Image: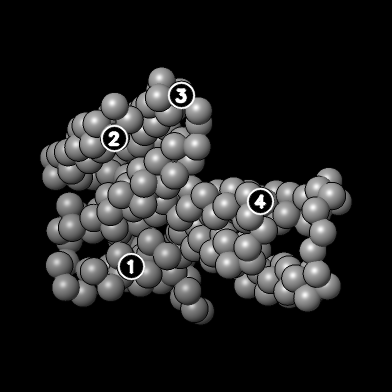
Amino acid sequence: IYKGVSILLFSFVFIYLLLRIIFNETLHDEVATYMFFFYHGNYIGDEIVWDANNHLLNSFIGNILYQFVGDNIPVLRLPNLLAFVLYFFGTIQLTKKFKTTLLKSTSLIALNSIPFIIEYFGNARGYGLSLGFFIWGLVHIHRYFDGRLLKHLGFSYVFMLLAVSANLTFVNSSLLLLAAVIIAPFLNASKRSKSDRYKECGLHFLFILCLSPFVLF
């Protein structure tokens, strides 16, 4: 049942978003994003345009796509649509842990049917990209807390950095996640080797180091 719900829900929402990127008129913020960052490419450097629509990863990808497709808005919206695939399968990873099929299915539907949030995946703005990466940051931090495997902590930090690069407001979420990871060992009595602790500290430091340029920006 859960698998059937997943397939039907993904098909319905993906087709809905695909129709949005084809037929929806260009939004005001998409026009600003297109003119400043996709077309002129002024998202970094001395001639940068200081505008809140400059979501760095989105601007970078959009500027590259512009070189090939010009002002083809549906194609420029595609990266955010493809991020929905990431987001959807991330929500599956989170909801499949629930005990009952009813809770799994309703949670999956709830997370993938929020008006205004889901529609971010149909716009060339960067919010869709950030949500797709953010959900996988949560997936891997859950896996890390479950098994204490450092690779999952590393993956979580990588996805959070990608989320921040696509939407700088995720800096706050990244810091909250970092705080949770640092505090968790003090609440958990499980023993860990000194080597693992040093590696964790190294990952924390590396994450902060990589996050700093986005904070300064």
Residue at mark 1: 61
| Callout 1 crowding tier (Cα within 10 Å): few <14, some 14–19, many ≥20 | some
Q: In the image, which is nearer the foreground, mark 1 or mark 4?
A: 4
Q: On residue 100, which mark appears?
A: 3
Q: Which mark is residue 49?
A: none
Task: Give the alpha-carbon distance from disc 2 to disc 3, as whole Å.
Answer: 13 Å
Residue at figure coordinates x 35%, y 43% from the top left: 88
Instruction: Answer with mark 4 or mark 3, whichever residue precedes in sequence.
Output: 3
Of mark 1 and mark 3, the one earlier in the sequence is 1
Q: Amino acid at mark 3?
A: Thr
Name the residue located 32 percent from the left edge and 47 percent from the top edge. Answer: 84
Horizontal and vertical percent position of residue 108? 39, 31
x then y, percent, for residue 68: 16, 73
Q: According to the image, label 4 marks what residue?
A: 145
Which residue is situated farthest in the top direction here? 102
Q: Amino acid at mark 1?
A: Ile
Which residue bears the numbered disc 2? 3
Name the amino acid type tagged 4.
Phe
